[in-house]
Image (cartoon, helix red, strand yellow):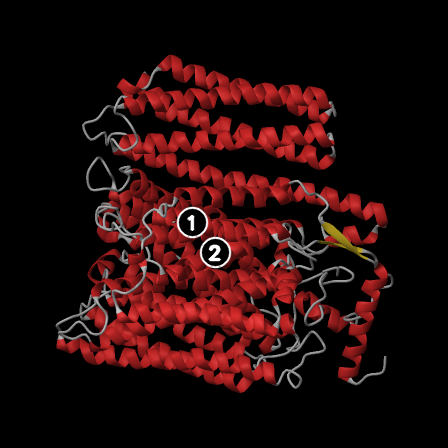
């Protein structure tokens, strides 16, 4: 009746796992109770969960990312603490539990923090930046969100019911096969990956079509804002790389569920094929995560230097070159697998080539700042912190791509330090800069600066303290993922790294404090102009927060920095001559239903409850059907109402700037 | 087409422009989906190729594949692509009954293909050559099965759109859905030609 699900699935095997389960379960119950007590369910359902408005979907994505960031960070803190104390002992975590933690930490950070964070920023910003009113496929956008959320929910549920995978975030066979990992952990991993990957693919497709088809008149590709360019390249990479991950995870699932022999030791399996498939996705994924951050840096540097981006064209070409090259270097992740000298030589040559376009982008940002009036606002601090730190990451990356250098460093903490150097200052700082930069656009008030600066310093100091010791330990030969060790010389470095993790804990806390303080002081931090930073691109032409339709009259674009040009020409913020009706899509609960049903399906598949899986599958099918045949799920906002909304905005803007209307 | 074009018209005109744009964007999006689906098949084909000799002392393709059966399957699918072509002509000229007739023929041919595939799989499984027998057979069943599963999805889709044509007639949205279904159908046909020439043909010859 309940498949493999029994009472033993509850985490009574370890006090720490039980605590984790209780905290998550009580946290979820607490949120539900709070919303009920405030009586906000209807508001939440009608205004947010069922919304097809790309800005609200974006905000929900970022919210998901921030919640999962806390979970992923707690995992990291536990690992650092374990390694700081586990000299000649087993520390405080049993080996099986430690393995679950490093698996869930990486899975969560890649799939449920970084991905939703960047997609959330795309959602809030890209349609506005290209002067569009909506995404090409608003309903598909909601489906993507809820598929991602249900994947995240699956990982969270594994904390309470059953155990998560212990096979690492890349689930290499043969260890991840049923023979060696008979529990449900790897199945949780497979289904979370499959569901969220489908969500990501739909997102990539949606942004690709939106950017190609919905740009404002006059916006040629070569004057498109940089963030939109990175969104376009990222979308292309998502559409073409994610199939490989889906195939890899699905074949692993077939091995586990149907006893097939794709990657098994016996029966004619071919282990290396999994690693090939996985990294065909895995390397582009690094750039899927990092290109959007590059886009944010470009926007932030131009705005806070008060200058047009230096070398716009070279930035575009570099972005495209990085996207193309990222598809040709995947093999540098497994030089030690034995692909042969020629293969290693080819990929060993290709990989450092990426440093060239990356170097170009760095110089473009530096030269934009040069002779600019640089304001060190919080987004700018994150950007400058990134530039300095990322260069170290780039150097160590080049070191690793050289096959002779990669070999001794393989699977050591040097590698851990290198990719955290890419992912924290490279990607996450960019997302945080974007979060600080576009927050007023989404909510109508700025984030408070003092706590933002404290958060930045805590993050960057914490980063160096946590990862420079790991670089050194890598040279000393410490393997990654060690639950305990017997080399006394390693411990001092691991204790320093623990302090780094504590600094980052402060960074996370300060971000939370910043948000709380900003909400409290929202009147003082309010932005009535829609353009709090004296911005350059079109998203600053709309109100903060924007009306549902973004633009009452769609702007005509003549060059890069369209909004800056309008401000210079004095045509910014002028009401259009005439207002027209605007047609916008209706909200839909089918997206939430689809996400919920896919969760039911995946959960049932993990525990092999076949009847429940059938219900979930049919539910997904039904949710798709309810929407597929509705061609006119839209409503009309009459011109008079548009005019009223716009006039109200003009009045408040004028009041704020003190000029008579 | 951008929002600006749509803003300048009035009333019904805006609505028509918006409908045209929606159809145009869906067609474009569907092509992109097909490209990513093509990558799925490319990876499965590559996986099959690297595993085609991993028979683990089990049967190989030479003893398992039967030319007449595979040939009949292939002819069914190719014929169904032709009949879908006739359906597309009927859609373009707005002939509802003829559209339905050709869709029905296409459906029957596709159903025949899927039935023959199930028959083939069943025969192999009872002869001790199921997907769990060897890496070669895992790759074979997964590649051919993924194609067959997508043909089955397309069959359900034909039924649903057939019902819609019968109930709503051939309005522009329905016609555009049929065109995308046609793309999908022909795409699966092309994939089958790849499977036929890479999986079956070398073993049979």
Position of A263 relative to A519 (above/below): above
Which residue is identified by label 1? A602
Pick whichever, A200 or A299, lies toward us.
A200
Can you give x and y, in whole percent of width and height, for residue A516 in the image?
A: 54, 81
Position of B180 relative to A606 (above/below): above
Chain ID, mark 2: A
Q: Residue furthest top?
A: B68
Same-chain status of marks 2 and 1:
yes
Q: Quadrant of the C terminus of chain B?
A: top left
Res. A262 in view: yes
Other-residue count near label 1 (Cα within 10 Å), few / some / many at <14 / 14–19 / ≥20: many
Pick whichever, B52 or A571, lies toward us.
B52
Residue at (52%, 82%) from the top-left corner?
Answer: A514
Residue at (55%, 58%) from the top-left corner?
Answer: A231
Can you give x and y, in whole percent of width and height, for residue B39 in the image?
A: 44, 40
Q: Quadrant of residue A124?
A: bottom right
Q: How many marks?
A: 2
Left or right side of A83 for A106: right
Res. A204 in view: no
Other-residue count near label 2 (Cα within 10 Å), few / some / many at <14 / 14–19 / ≥20: many
Residue at (19%, 61%) from the top-left corner?
Answer: A408
Position of B33 relative to A166 (above/below): above
Chain ID, mark 1: A
Q: Quadrant of residue A84?
A: bottom left
Left or right side of A372 for A20: left
Secondary element at image label 2: helix
Residue at (47%, 37%) from the top-left corner?
Answer: B38
Left or right side of B78 for A344: left
Q: Quadrant of residue A487?
A: bottom left
Can you give x and y, in whole percent of width and height, for residue A304 in the image?
A: 58, 77
Which residue is identified by label 2? A150
């Amino acid at each position: 009746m309940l498949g493999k699900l029994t009472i033993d699935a509850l985490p009574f095997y370890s006090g720490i796992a039980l605590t984790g389960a209780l905290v998550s379960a009580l946290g979820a119950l607490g949120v539900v109770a709070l919303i009920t007590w405030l009586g906000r369910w209807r508001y939440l359902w009608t205004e947010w969960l069922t919304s097809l408005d790309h800005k609200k979907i974006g905000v929900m994505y970022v919210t998901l990312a921030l919640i999962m960031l806390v979970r992923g960070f707690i995992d990291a803190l536990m690992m650092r603490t374990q390694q700081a104390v586990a000299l000649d002992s087993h520390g405080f975590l049993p080996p099986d539990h430690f393995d679950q933690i490093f698996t869930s930490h990486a899975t969560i950070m890649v799939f449920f923090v970084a991905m939703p964070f960047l997609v959330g920023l795309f959602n809030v910003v890209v349609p506005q930046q290209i002067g569009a009113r909506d995404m090409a496929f608003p309903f598909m956008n909601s489906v993507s969100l809820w598929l991602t959320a249900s994947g995240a929910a699956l990982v969270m549920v594994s904390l309470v019911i059953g155990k998560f995978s212990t096979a690492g975030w890349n689930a290499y066979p043969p260890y991840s096969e049923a023979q060696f990992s008979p529990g449900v952990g790897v199945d949780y991993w497979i289904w979370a990956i499959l569901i969220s990957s489908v969500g990501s693919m739909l997102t990539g497709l949606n942004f690709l079509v939106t950017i190609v088809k919905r740009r404002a008149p006059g916006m040629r590709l070569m004057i498109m804002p940089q963030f939109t360019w990175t969104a376009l390249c990222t979308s292309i990479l998502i559409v073409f790389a994610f199939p490989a991950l889906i195939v890899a995870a699905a074949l692993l699932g077939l091995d586990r569920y149907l006893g097939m022999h794709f990657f098994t030791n016996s029966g004619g399996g071919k282990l290396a094929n999994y690693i090939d498939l996985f990294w065909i996705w895995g390397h582009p994924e690094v750039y899927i995560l990092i290109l959007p951050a590059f886009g944010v840096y470009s926007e932030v540097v131009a705005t806070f230097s008060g200058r047009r981006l230096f070398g716009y064209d070279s930035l575009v070409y570099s972005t495209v070159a990085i996207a193309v090259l990222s598809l040709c270097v995947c093999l540098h992740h497994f030089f030690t697998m034995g692909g042969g000298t020629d293969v290693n030589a080819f990929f060993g040559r290709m990989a450092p080539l990426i440093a060239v376009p990356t170097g170009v982008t760095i110089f473009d940002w530096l030269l934009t700042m040069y002779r600019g009036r640089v304001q060190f606002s919080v987004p700018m601090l994150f950007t400058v912190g990134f530039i300095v730190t990322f260069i170290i990451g780039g150097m160590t990356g080049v070191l690793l791509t050289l096959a002779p250098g990669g070999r001794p460093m393989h699977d050591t903490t040097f590698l851990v330090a290198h990719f955290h150097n890419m992912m924290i200052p490279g990607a996450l700082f960019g997302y945080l800069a974007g979060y600080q930069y576009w927050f007023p656009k989404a909510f109508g008030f700025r984030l408070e600066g003092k706590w933002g600066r404290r958060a930045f310093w805590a993050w960057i100091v914490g980063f160096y303290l946590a990862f420079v010791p790991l670089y050194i330990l890598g040279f000393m030969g410490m393997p990654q993922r060690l639950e305990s060790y017997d080399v006394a010389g390693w411990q001092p470095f691991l204790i320093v790294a623990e302090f780094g993790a504590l600094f980052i804990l402060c960074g996370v806390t300060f971000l939370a404090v910043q948000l709380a303080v900003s909400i409290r002081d929202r009147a003082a931090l309010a932005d009535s102009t829609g353009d709090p930073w004296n911005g350059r691109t079109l998203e600053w032409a709309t109100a903060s927060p924007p009306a549902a339709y973004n633009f009452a009259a769609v702007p005509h674009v003549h060059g890069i920095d369209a909004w800056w040009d309008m401000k210079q020409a004095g045509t910014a913020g002028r009401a259009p001559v005439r207002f027209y009706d605007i047609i916008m899509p209706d909200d839909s609960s089918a997206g939430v239903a689809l996400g919920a049903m896919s969760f039911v399906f995946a959960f049932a598949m993990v525990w092999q409850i076949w009847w429940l899986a059938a219900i979930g599958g049919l539910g997904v099918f039904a949710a798709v059907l309810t929407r597929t045949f509705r061609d006119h799920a839209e409503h009309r906002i009459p011109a008079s109402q548009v005019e009223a909304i716009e006039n109200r905005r003009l009045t408040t803007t004028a009041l704020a700037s003190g000029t008579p209307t | 087409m951008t929002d600006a074009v749509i803003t300048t018209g009035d009333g019904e005109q805006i609505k028509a422009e918006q409908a045209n744009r929606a159809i145009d964007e869906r067609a474009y999006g569907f092509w992109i989906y097909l490209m990513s689906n093509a990558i799925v098949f490319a990876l499965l084909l590559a996986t099959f190729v690297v595993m085609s000799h991993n028979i683990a002392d089990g049967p190989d393709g030479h003893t398992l594949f039967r030319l007449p059966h595979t040939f009949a399957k292939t002819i069914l699918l190719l014929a169904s692509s032709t009949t879908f072509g006739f359906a597309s002509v009927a859609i373009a000229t707005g002939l509802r009954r003829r559209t339905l007739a050709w869709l029905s023929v296409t459906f029957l041919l596709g159903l025949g293909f899927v039935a023959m595939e199930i028959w083939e799989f069943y025969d192999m499984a009872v002869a001790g050559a199921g997907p769990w027998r060897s890496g070669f057979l895992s790759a074979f069943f997964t590649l051919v099965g993924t194609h067959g599963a997508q043909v089955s999805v397309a069959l359900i889709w034909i039924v649903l759109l057939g019902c819609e044509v019968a109930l709503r007639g051939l309005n522009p949205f329905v016609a555009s859905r049929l065109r995308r279904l046609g793309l999908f159908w022909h795409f699966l046909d092309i994939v089958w030609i790849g499977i036929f020439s890479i999986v079956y043909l070398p073993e049979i010859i």
